[in-house]
Amino acid sequence: MYATTQRCVFCGTEYPLTHRGSCTRCTGPGEESALHETLAVQYDVAALKRQLDRDELARRPSGLWRYRELLPVVDPAFRVELGAGGTRLVPLTRIAEAIAGNRLLMKVEGSNPSGSFKDRPIGVAASVALERGARGLACLTFVLLLGAAGLADQGASVNVEKYVQISAYGAEVVTPIGDLGQLYALADRIEAEMGWSFMHNVQAYQTDGDKTTAFEICEQLGWRAPAAVFVPTGTGTNLFGLWQGFVLFKDLGFIDALPRMFAVQPVGAASLVAAWEAHQAIPSALQRIEPNLAPPISHRVSGYHAYKAMQESGGGAVAVADVDMLAALKDLASYEGIYAETASAAALAGIRRALALGLLRQEETHQTGIVGILTSHGLKNSLALTQVLPAQTKVEGTWEALRSYVERKAGAL
Ligand SMILES: [Zn+2]
């Protein structure tokens, strides 16, 4: 195996690969902090350079394990193989910005088996846990769910689609009501006392799964990185994982240049944007989160690791309003045939915001290209949209009634 240690990207402390939880020098258990997810798996780049050949890699089947040397699992028997990865990178051709000459591409992560990019990080982290002999697996916001992971304390309800989907796979869904800090504390207690393996305690391995998205993007662009990547961002781990992936590919000599990383957050839940504007590398927790249409990326605090990726890459952070995410969602569906969750459509809304603010240069948008990460399929959260999309029109089921309606409609156009 080429994975060597876990290193804290804030303080530099190294931990063995078997270490669980956060960097103990940077945070305590249950603390609400931007320094929770600072560990990153390190690889022996020199050995990988001798072993890995770009052209040979290109001939392998698509999916997570195409990049097996760059993932921390030794025995193939423990690889979770449910078809994660290998998602499309789709050039937008019909929306106004594309027609105006901008080269925009969307990485459609909603086509992963569970409809979410999370199949990558959880797939890798679960494989690691199984290889280490875990007796039971559990995830926050997956199994100890939503009562806290959403905005239950502010009156929001459980996401029915996610609950049903998870239950169908056979998991028991428990929803303690409380905030995310309480949920983490409870999870750690279960792990300590009952021996379950919680996925957030192997965060660095989740980040490794997220890296595969960056690897695929580089390959799909012909072994180069885009000019900028826009990532809908809650905790920031996906953005950080993508960045780690681009950096590793550059270290291996597979690509020549790195992209600028941009976080997109909902207005009212944008701790990274606030930190970015205040030049505060360790984002502070927001006093409260304003309700919005993108609960998956609404957290009181995002991570230092994401800030660091934005800073190192020369990127930034933008906040987008519900109305902009909805417009992006509808445009992606109606013009481009891609139905993404509201929180995912934030990627396109964020690109539009950055264009409006002049954050992107013309050679970036017109030549090298900008990639948005559409993190989840629209079917993950359709019911929430019944409140904001037009209601269905009911007409009597006769030809006369229908013709009359259609003619009135046509007359109105
Ligand atoms: Zn640390």
Image (cartoon, grey):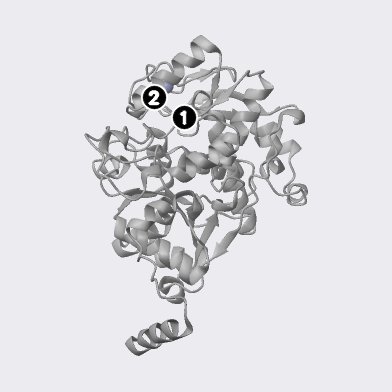
Q: Picture quarter containing residue 122?
A: top right
- Image height of 323 relative to 312, above or below: below
Amino acid at the residue labelled 2: Leu
Residue 352, percent from left and from top: 36, 63
Residue at image location 51% in from the left, 72% down from the top: 93
For label 1, being within 8 Å of ligand 1 is answered no
Residue that lies at the very extreme toward the left in this rendered image: 287
- Image height of 280 relative to 277, above or below: above
Q: In which quarter of the image is the N terminus?
A: top right
Q: Which of marks 2 and 1 is nearer the N terminus?
A: 1
Asked if the residue at tag 1 contacts the one at tag 2, i.e. Cβ–Cβ closer than 8 Å, the answer is yes
Quadrant observed for ligand 1 in the rendered image = top left
Residue at image location 55% in from the left, 55% down from the top: 108
Residue 210, percent from left and from top: 55, 40
For this rendering, which residue is in front, 277 or 289?
289
Residue at image location 75% in from the left, 37% down from the top: 51
Q: Name the residue under label 1.
A: 140
Q: Picture quarter containing residue 195?
A: top right
Q: Name the residue under label 2.
A: 183
Amino acid at the residue labelled 1: Leu
SS class, disc 1: loop
The answer, for residue 211, to whether it is visible in the render is yes
The reply, left or right, for residue 220 in relation to residue 96 is: right
Q: Residue 150 carries which label?
A: none
Q: Residues within 10 Å of mark 2 (few under 14, many from 20)?
A: many
SS class, disc 2: helix
Q: How far apart are marks 2 and 1 (CA)?
A: 8 Å
